[in-house]
Image (spheres, grey):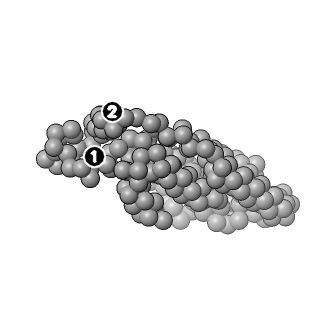
Amino acid sequence: MTDRTTYVSHAGVRRRGWTDTMVRELLGTPDVQGRDPRRWSPAPLRLYLLARVETVERTPEFAETSALSPARSSAAAAYAERRRAAVLATIRVEPIEVPLVPGPELERRAVRHRQLLGARSPGTAPGEGAAAGALVRWQVSYLRHALARYEALLDGLYGETGRGEAERLLRRRLYEAIGAAYPALAQECRRRIAVER
């Protein structure tokens, strides 16, 4: 087992003021790599010897790279903000085309979609005596899934910088479009918009 007091994680190095580029260029390969046995994560655990990190922090290369870092960070932040604004503007004006399906066919598709997801309400087989409220929820879920292609509008937004805001705006626009195309589903769409705020 690795003694964690002599190692620092990638996140710990970042908290010390390092950027990913600095870690890659100045530290290189982690001293320990693998899976964290205490929690599941798709990302490997990366640990760096604390003594090695501190040694590199005293080098002229680190001082030079650190001096450039704020300029790089502000340029990256400006780019991220421009990208966020562009994505939000695109989401606001993108026409949302909801597939128009006759009522009975929409119900059939919604029930089938529910079955494919493997979700069943306790004591209710889809299509056999499902409550009207449940059927409305299933229809909205089916139509929301049918509009998943619009999520490509979020491409290029990473991390927290504007991604959450863009996702909320997109979901709201999709639910508004579903409610406009199917007035009987409008109340459920408004409920979902309110819940997600």
Q: Position of residue 27 (x, y in %)?
A: 71, 51
Q: Position of residue 196 (x, y in %)?
A: 45, 61
Residue type, label 2: Glu
| Dot 1 crowding, Cα within 10 Å, few <14, some 14–19, many 20+ | many
Closer to the camera in the image, 147 or 50: 147
Report whether residue 67 is seen. yes
- Image point 41% across, 50% down: which residue? 183
Q: Is residue 94 above or below residue 73?
A: above
| Dot 2 crowding, Cα within 10 Å, few <14, some 14–19, many 20+ | few
Q: Which residue extends farthest left?
A: 123
The residue tagged with tag 2: helix, strand or loop?
Answer: helix
Please give the label number shown on residue 135: 1
Residue type, label 1: Leu
Question: Could you tell me if the residues under marks 1 and 2 are in contact, i.e. CB atoms within 8 Å?
Answer: no
- Image point 63% across, 50% down: which residue? 91
- Image point 22% across, 44% down: which residue? 120
| Residue 6 quadrant | bottom right
* Measured Cα–Cα span from mark 1 to mark 2: 12 Å
Q: Position of residue 96 (x, y in %)?
A: 56, 43
Report whether residue 55 is seen. no
Left or right: 164 with respect to 182? right
Can you tell which of label 1 and label 2 is closer to the viewer?
Answer: 2
**Number of numbered discs visible in the structure rendering:** 2
Please give the label number shown on residue 3: none
Task: Name the residue that disc number 2 marks.
Answer: 105
| Residue 85 quadrant | bottom right
N-term-proximal mark, 1 vs 2: 2
Closer to the camera in the image, 180 or 39: 180
The residue tagged with tag 1: helix, strand or loop?
Answer: helix
| Residue 64 quadrant | bottom right
Closer to the camera in the image, 54 or 182: 182
